[in-house]
Amino acid sequence: MLEQKKFGVISLGCDKNRVDTEKMLAAITAKGFTLTDDASQANILIVNTCGFLNAARKEAIETILEFSEYKNGNLEKIVVTGCLPQKFIDELFVPLSEADVFLGVQDYQLLFEAIECSYATGERQNFVGKGKEAISIDRVQTTDPHFAYLKIADGCYNHCTYCLIPKIRGKYRSYPMEALLKEAEELGELSELVIVAQDTTRYGEELYGENRFVELLQKLSALENIRKIRLLYCYPDVITDELIAEIRDNDKILKYIDIPLQHSEDRVLKLMNRKGKRADYLALFARLRKEIPSIAIRSTFISGFPSETEEEFLQMIEFLKEARLVNCGFFAYSKEPDTAAARMKGQVHYRTKARRVKALYEIQRQISLQFLSGLIGKEIEVICDGIDYEKGCFVGRAYFNAPEIDGKVYFNAAEAMQGETYLVKIQKTDAYDLYGFTEDYTI
């Protein structure tokens, strides 16, 4: 029934969701189906959704509604997968009549069965929760060919009071090391492999009875097809001396670490159910910088958490000034249903949250500008991501720039190849990006 159908796929949300989408694309191509990136030509359109925040849920629903207009043409079925139906299927199934099939985060292997049922019966299908998580290593890469994400685990142990992830993705589950190594090897030649999970640093604890994150990094580093490795989502309480030493001594691991803190003040951290305190975080940064002087530290923070006072907000500003992180993301607290924080007293007005986030970004802008200004006149290694046609130059990233979330390096050169590394002499900077030029040579 599906043999002649064309599939289109839209992936929303985070890099972990992207990996799920890439594995779904591989399953579609393995069946011999045709993929199209033109939604107007698709007979079956899959929307892999995020449901983490209200804004993400709104984006997902608006995307489904927008593309449902193609049902006046070639489009026959809309399939909604991922986090949104996993958590909110009871609220979605009846009103979101534009969608024909729903599957959750562990139901991807039922994709074709669910679509077949929809065609055979002419009725909408709810397959959420009917599947069982299957480990797949096959992927159709959707990033630029020289870098990829490797999701090493799913779910979360941490139960932060503002977060829906454990109720969407379930308990923390590490993927078998041998499967991850094979998956990474089959991604082909990579200038950069980005390690992701809800919490990368707890890898192996529930699967092997002990933490094996460092061992995994060592074995990934031994793969000849991987040039560099970048670490994201490293929780501060699990950054051990062993891990710090591995980052320091392993030439393949970029001297960059993403440590989501979410706040700096002890009272708010306790309300968030976050592990660690302000002094612990500053001590961790000091340890990292002592062992790895060039380390670039990134973090994320939430402002406007229930009962956050103006004084605590101002103390977070002081924390940023002291911590001097290279990159930061800031988010206004989002009141999410079925979370402990949503029931807390002292919900902060949205205007206050917006003001605080804006002020935090301004402080970080000044910190980032000072860091980047110190590079003017120096040569730095930059991996070329391609051409920016609007700016009329090449664009790439230094070791302190993670793909898609941090700043960029724009540079002029006689010629540059995507995925190759160049020495770029920095001429100027703005708050987040660098500008320079390179001679015609690679490292």
Image (tube, rainbow, N blue to C red):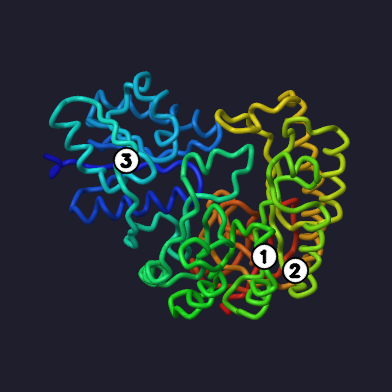
Q: Residue at horizontal 34%, vertical 39%? A: 129
- Judge left or right: residue 41 versus residue 419: left
To which residue does mark 1 refer? 239
How much space separates mark 2 and mark 3, taking CA atoms? 46 Å
Circle nearer the viewer, 2 or 3: 2
Q: In the visual, does 67 lie left or right of 433? A: left
Amino acid type at image mark 3: Asp
Question: What quarter of the picture does the C terminus occupy?
Answer: bottom right
Closer to the chain start, of discs 2 and 3, is 3
Q: Please report contact status of discs 2 and 3: CB closer than 8 Å, yes or no.
A: no
State the mark number for residue 288. 2
In the rendering, at what x and y percent does residue 362 appear? 79, 42
Residue type highlighted by circle 1: Ile
Residue sitting at x 44%, y 30%: 88
Question: Which comes sooner in the sequence, label 1 or label 3?
Answer: 3
Nearer to me, 9 or 38: 9
Circle 3 sits on which residue?
38
How packed is label 1: few (under 14 Cα within 10 Å), some, or many (20 or more)?
some
Estimate the spatial distance between the alpha carbons at disc 2 and disc 1, rounded to whole Å: 10 Å
Check contact, mark 2 vs mark 1: CB within 8 A. Answer: yes
* Of marks 2 and 1, the one in the foreground: 1
Q: Does 435 appear above or below 97?
A: below
Q: Earlier in the sequence, mark 2 or mark 1?
A: 1
The answer to whether residue 441 is seen in the rendering is no
Marks 1 and 3, how far apart at CA: 44 Å
Placement of the N terminus among the 4 image quadrants:
top left
Task: Please give the name of the residue rendered at 55% of the width and 54% of the height, measured from the top-left corner.
Answer: 388
